[in-house]
Amino acid sequence: MTKGTEPTIRGKTAIVGIGQSKKVGRVPGVSPLALAAEAANAALADAGMEKTEIDAVISTHAMSTSFHRFSVAFSEYWGIVPTYSNNVQVSGATGAATLNEAAAAINAGYAKNVLVVIGDSLLTGMTPDMALRSMTESRDQQYEMPFGIPVANTFAMTAHRHMKEYGTTREHFAHVAVTQRKHAIATPGAQMTEEITIDDVLNSKVVTTPYHKLDCALISDGGAAFIITSAERAKDCPKKPIYLLGAGECFTHEHIFLMPDITTTGGVTSSRLAYEMAGVKPSDFDVAGIYDCFTGTVVMMVEDLGFCKKGEGGPFIADGNMTYGGAIPANTHGGLLSYAHIGNGGSYFHAQEVVRQLRGECGPRQVEGAELGLYHALGAGFACAGTTVLGTEATL
């Protein structure tokens, strides 16, 4: 392929509608399909579109249901017959992967208006043990499951190694939880809104060393949806279009013991690809949504995404660089740690927060002058990484 002909989605599509279920957190008696429908209806209204205009649905597996094709089941439930449908499953990275796919499908001519949607009931539709087991059972059945390596232990290994190699401390991890709880307190509808301190995190129940309960993501019910369309169609929608400027993904391993470097993730590659497509660098971003299934994950991600050098993530966050007035305000809604975590689609709330920030809709938690946003999602013990660059202008 000659220089200048590389495939790109830069500025060709835009998010024109976002929506959530009426409640997130504990939502008893509402099925995953109903939660997804609430979110889709809200996104449709936000976009100023009719249901009949949606010709594509992209979703992911809802852990509390038996539907293998959630996108198809949802379309039937919602009353549409799309001509493009896909159910993406790359664990926590699914959020970025589905947004990237929606942009690619429109760019390729497969669809005009894509609904990206998910709903799940991890909190009230399953017991806590069942929710954790559903995540654990996604691990390898032959080599990992028999030896007792559930998802928390997988991420704990990377945190331990980071501590050993770079001197990162549990206090550094705790700063992530405390910062994001402060963000959640200012966010309407957040699941956890009680203020916490560093000592609260360090004294909470040990889950798997070095992680305590407050270092770990929530278990939640909820739904989230996006409507993505062409840049041309976006001009006719009522809200400010938020353009997809860059996308990158990377899939490094299936088994954690084959991870190339246990303290460096595919986020290095996925972000580089997204930055190159968008023509930006880390210091250009005004706001970010960074996957935070565990506090140590965020420490590693601010390094791998280029906001600081490898090994400096702990002090970088402890110095206030991921909150207001810092280098990169991130997870200003509270993230998976304090806002909500609905499984494979948990980080959709991160992307929606970035969209709201870029629209200027966040009120007291608004990052002033936000024009360029980063959304990064990961999953499966750092096996999967997806990065999306979002902006208020189609060209930079």
Image: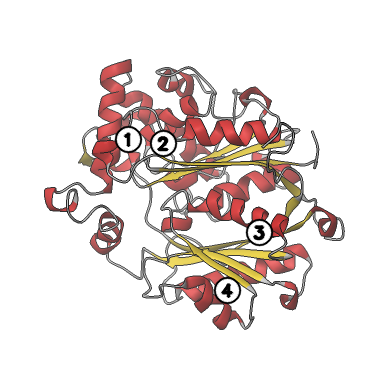
Task: State the CA–CA distance, disc 2 to disc 3.
Answer: 37 Å
Q: Position of residue 153 (x, y in %)?
A: 23, 42
Looking at the rendered image, the disc whose residue lies closer to the viewer, 4 or 1, is: 4
Find the distance from the CA under tag 4 to the CA under tag 1: 36 Å
Amino acid on which disc 4 is placed: Ala
Quick one: label 3, few (<14), some, or many (20+) residues within 10 Å? many
CB atoms at circles 3 and 1 under 8 Å apart?
Answer: no
Q: CA distance from mark 3 to mark 4?
A: 22 Å
Residue 307 in the image, given as x and y percentages of width and height:
54, 23
When asked about the image quadrant of residue 200, the answer is top left
Q: Are marks 1 and 2 in contact (CB under 8 Å)?
A: yes
Mark seen at residue 105: 3
The type of residue carrying mark 2 is: Ala
Look at mark 1 in the image and give the residue it sits on: 201
Q: Nearer the viewer, residue 237 or 23?
A: 237
Q: For mark 2, what is the residue? A: 177
| For marks 4 and 1 on the same chain, the one whose residue lies earlier in the sequence | 4
Taking the view exactly as shown, the residue that stands out farthest to the right is 236
Q: CA distance from mark 1 to mark 2?
A: 7 Å
Q: Is 33 placed left or right of 247 in the picture?
A: left
Using a 10 Å C-alpha cutoff, classify the residue at mark 2 as few (fewer than 14 neighbours), some (14 to 19) or many (20 or more).
many
Measuring from the top left, give residue 46's x and y in whole percent: 73, 63
Residue located beneath label 4 in the image: 37
Residue positioned 32% across, 46% down in the render: 254
Taking the spot 65% from the left edge, 25% from the top edge, the residue there is 281
* Nearer to us in this view, 223 or 150: 150
In the rendered structure, which disc, 2 or 3, sits on the residue that comes first in sequence? Answer: 3
Q: Secondary structure at mark 4?
A: helix
Left or right: 278 in relation to 121: right
Under tag 3, what secondary structure? helix
